Image (spheres, rainbow, N blue to C red):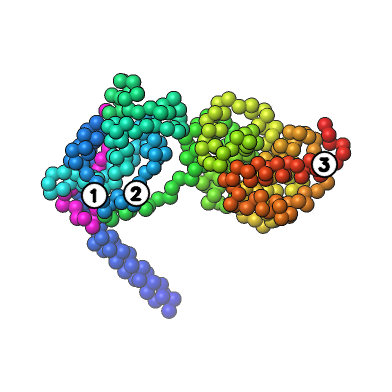
Amino acid sequence: MEDNGVKVREAKEESQVKKSAEQIRDKKQDIKFDVRDYPINYLVSQYEKQEFYIPLEYQRNFVWGNKDRCFFIESILMGLPIPFMFFAGCDDGRLEIIDGAQRMQTLREFVKRKMKLSKLAKLTELDGFVFEDLSTATQRKFLNRTFRVVVLDEKTTTDIRQDLFNRINTSGVKASDSEVRRGSYPGKLTSYIEKCCKNELFVALCPISKNKAVRQERFELVLRFFAYLNDYKHFEHEVNPFLNDFLAKNLDSFDEQQYETDFIGMLNFVQKHFQFGFAKSQNATTTPRVRFEAISVGVALALRAYPNLEVKNVDWLNSEEFKVLTTSDASNNEGKLVARVEYVRDRLIEAKVNDCNI
């Protein structure tokens, strides 16, 4: 019976494998295409003449704002690689743009319609520039930069084109803000933050899910600690620009000794006085950002005032006031940020024992 059972199972698996191969063969699209390199000057020219055009059914739900457009132009000027664009041939000889409409429109706006650059992450000297403000050499290099384009055969059906567009624009996982920051700002401070992320005590005190750890959540928390500790009074509501600016300004010029003192001193204090570290409970698997910010920055501020600080208790952790200050809807509020870090600082100083004044 056992042998028969094994044979039945093997026969079933073999049948499934055969059917799966047949399904792949049946569903596999026989798509003909070629790959071309077009310079920006040619792309814009053909787009303006409607030789390259955008079918509305592909693009109506995908619109870039000024921030995205400026980021794209900056990437080109910096010589960064740009993803492929996808076109398809038409019976009338023109090419329709399946994927790349926002890039195409941005190129035309910048080259032909005086789109003004603003709030660039790296090329800050170009703030307020239009294309004509660039040096002649830079203009030439920009216009001669080539984009790689996949051009589908004109016989490719509308259904296949639409399916391709949907797959391109819905597949994959968008990089987190922290992943983007970590990759966009290589330098001494970035390397130092990465070292802090591996600190065993930090990892133990600050539980993070495996998925969030992969998405660079620890890098985000450590960066927030240093940025808010050193500049929280200048925070103005938007977290990402604030963190980007702090990282850019201090990338290769920061006081590593002071940063080390602040970070390690804060961790040691939290380990000694906070039963669950930065977490809410013993079995917590993640650490809320606002809670981490409040505790870590508040502790570090208190230690700057009293380096030998010892406290009687941290009972206020369970107070309604602390709970309100560390709710998620307070995370991007300027007043709440100041309030929560200073609340922790002040409660710790109020609870200090008498012999820690030095």
Q: Residue 26 location, x and y as percent?
A: 24, 62
The boundaries of the magenta stretch are 144-161
Which quarter shows the N terminus? bottom left
Which badge, 3 or 2, is on the more N-terminal residue?
A: 2
Disc 1 crowd, CA 10 A, few/some/many (<14, 14-19, 20+): few
Q: How far apart are marks 3 and 1 (CA)?
A: 68 Å
Query: How many numbered discs?
Result: 3
Task: Name the foreground residue: 10 vs 65.
Answer: 65
Is 193 on the left-hand or right-hand side of 14? right
Which badge, 3 or 1, is on the more N-terminal residue?
A: 1
Q: Residue 179 location, x and y as percent?
A: 49, 42
- Residue 78: numbered disc: none
Residue annotated with mark 3 = 352
Q: Distance between the residues labelled 3 and 2?
A: 56 Å
Q: Residue 346 location, x and y as percent?
A: 75, 42
Looking at the rendering, which quadrant does residue 48 occupy? top left
Residue annotated with mark 2 = 62
* Badge 1 element: loop
Residue at the image position 39 percent from the left and 39 percent from the top: 66
- Residue 55: numbered disc: 1
Q: In this view, does 246 lie above or below 65?
A: above
Residue extending farthest to the top is 136
Is 55 on the left-hand or right-hand side of 307? left
Which quarter shows the C terminus? top right
Residue 206 appears in the rendering = no
